[in-house]
Image (cartoon, coloured by chain):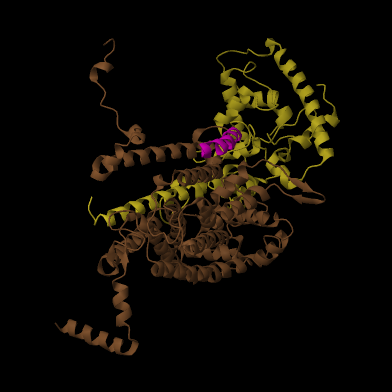
Amino acid sequence: MITEKIARQASEAIDSRLRAAKFIRTALNHVFPDHWSFMLGEIALYSFMILVVTGTYLALFFHASSAKVIYNGSYHALDGQKVSVAYRSVLNICFDVPAGLLVRQMHHWAALIFLWAILAHMARIFLTAAYRKPREMNWLIGLTLLVLALVNGFFGYSMLDDLLSGTGLRIGYAILISIPLVGPWLAFLFMGGTVPNPATLPRMFALHIFLVPGLITALLGLHLFMIWRQLHTNYPGPKRTNRTIVGSRLWPAYTGKSIGLLLLVFGVIAGLGAFFQIDPVWTYGPYDPASTMAGAQPDWYLGWVEGALRLFPGVNLRLGHWLIPEIFFPAVLMPSLLFLFLYSWPFTEKLFSKDTGDQNVLRLPYEQPFLTAGGAGLFIFLLVLLVSGGDDFLALAVGGSVVEIRTILRIVVLIAPPCAAVLTYFICVRVMRRKALRTRMTSPEASAEAAAPDEMALEPRPPVDVHELTPGGE
Amino acid sequence: MPCKEGTIKIYLSASQPCSTPCIQANVGNNMAENKARARCRFILGCAMACLALWVLCWPASGQTPEPNAKPDGGAIFAQRCAACHGDRGQGIAAAVTIAGPSLQAEHDLGMVMTAVESGPSHMPVFSRVLKSAQIQAVARYVTTDLAVIPLAHGNIGEGGKTFRMYCAACHRTAVRGGVLAFAGRNAPDLKNKSAALIAGTIRWGPGTMPKFPSSVLSDEQLASTVDYVRFVQHPPNPGGNPLKQVGPVSEGGVGAIAVLFLIGITGWIERGGKG
């Protein structure tokens, strides 16, 4: 009773000053539709929150400087070795800072999960055509968030100055300067010239902890605001039209679900950080431009670019006295075309679509076989590239020659996507026919429709007689 | 022997570890070197052919003292091996016949016996010349009396540096092996290899692996490298399952499984926590 009284007095005190009651009342009654696939973006949101929290802790102990010092610390296998200040601070985080290794591993795992969740969320948007009017702008913002997440992931991976990240940074630098005309200037802007140089780490650090996360936060706010403003989409179903929305209110049902998901995402990431080692920089050793290591890969979200680099044949293009090196095509041109396609897709799709006006009811993937088939083909293409990025471990696992495996993958990357697309198309058409059939069988007004002569082909055949199947029968 | 002094010099330059592609990138290559290498391969081929003939035509009368006497490894070494490997197994840089590598890091009995029996690279095959007892005796002599390079008490830090410089490009920093762009020949996993075997292999350079003679790696560097490899075979684990030390590939896979699990959780939440 007393708590109730205190709560009432406090809320009245706040409301008399901020006049928040009206807004909060509408906000708490805001309706969100119930479906598991609408929570994929939330996984990304919550892993981003974990990234910010863990990253803040790590920033207290990380020093982005490539000045050389002699290491004498808890990891004795590097005693007396010349390492950079940045690398030493990472070793200190791993071995000396309280909970440093746990937080660092959580940060890295959260980054991997962030990108996987963005991918899953984006696949859902794409396959249900949720990007249609009025949500085209939010699709563009979401894509920009993906690009920023990829870039920031690369910065985080590269600034530890261990042998793996240094190797990755060299590849990133090579990709950057392969861009015709502007490449070297971009390298000067982002990396301070040829890599490695003393300006690279501080520049990446500032971008990684300040500029890019700031942009991500701002765009995330805009992303969520637009969802709020435009209301969420609905899957087709009873009472669900372009003007109505069916689901649970923000308070209490949706809040409960969402906080539950937040805690579970946090739990999974903390569990990964505690029980699975990630990026053991002490094993990789400090970066030295003269050294390199076999089995060097980027984190998975750039593995498809690595795979494209490995699969693409060594063909340089000469235009007059200009040379466009081979890595430009797989590592700059291919991703650029991919993102150009994705950015323009809501507008390109309008050319084929008959939809007019606002679209708040989603299409199911099988209702748009052509688009779903395209998405499946694109997914398989990127998946084969991702596998090719680890083709050396594939060769180790199957005990074959990496040269032969790469040849096979070069064929697979061309053949598998169209096959997957065609297969998906036919599966969608089949599912669509079956669903149409079921509707006609169940709903009374549709059964009259089904009697029309041109719909007869959709009728099921009579059950097969058992006698016909016995061998040697009549 | 039909070998001239000039032959030996060219051959020695080819026997440097620079002849493998990965190191070659650091050293740089030029036309003259390639030509010299091609020439030395040809001369080396001739020399090997002569040697093979010489070994095959070796008269059987030379062997067969009393069958029950214990063979003297030192004597066999002086007779069969010292010409190429030096009388103390120190290796010969430029000598009368073909130069052999130093054996002073060959602590592994089995590997020396294999080498004597099978004759790796340009070494003659002795399996038809020496009996197995004799091979064992000479291998024991090499590993106990000649292998004087100490393998303990290296500097792990320096060894790590050397390993990253020369070895990690094929064996990975985690010493778990890696692939090479040669058909079916991959750099092996070093996890269960003994210190004796590692040291001898570094000097010997079997198969596709380059040799690292004392002109490239000093005895101290060798001992340090061996120490480092032995250390990384069982690296300290400050926390978490190392996922077979594969790196970003296995980490991405675990991340994908975790996200699939979380997607499953969203379904579970939508069903009200049931089922």
Q: Is residue A167 visible?
A: yes
- Rendered yellow, the chain in question is B
Q: Residue furthest left?
A: A1
Measured as percent of width and height from the top left, residue A354 is found at 47, 52
Which corner quadrant of the image does residue A160 belong to?
bottom right
Q: Is residue A19 left or right of residue A406?
A: left
Q: Position of residue A68 (x, y in %)?
A: 64, 65
Q: Position of residue A161 (x, y in %)?
A: 59, 60
Extent of the magenta region: A403-418
Q: Is residue A6 magenta?
A: no
Q: Nearer the viewer, residue A440 or A153?
A: A440
Quadrant where the N terminus of chain A is found in the figure? bottom left
Q: Residue placed at 76% from the left, 28% from the top? A: B98
**Which colour is chain A painted?**
brown
Q: Quadrant of residue A316?
A: top right
Vertical placement of residue A262 versus B68, above or below: below
Q: What kind of secondary structure does the magenta stretch mostly adopt?
A: helix
At 52% from the left edge and 32% from the top edge, which residue is drawn?
A399
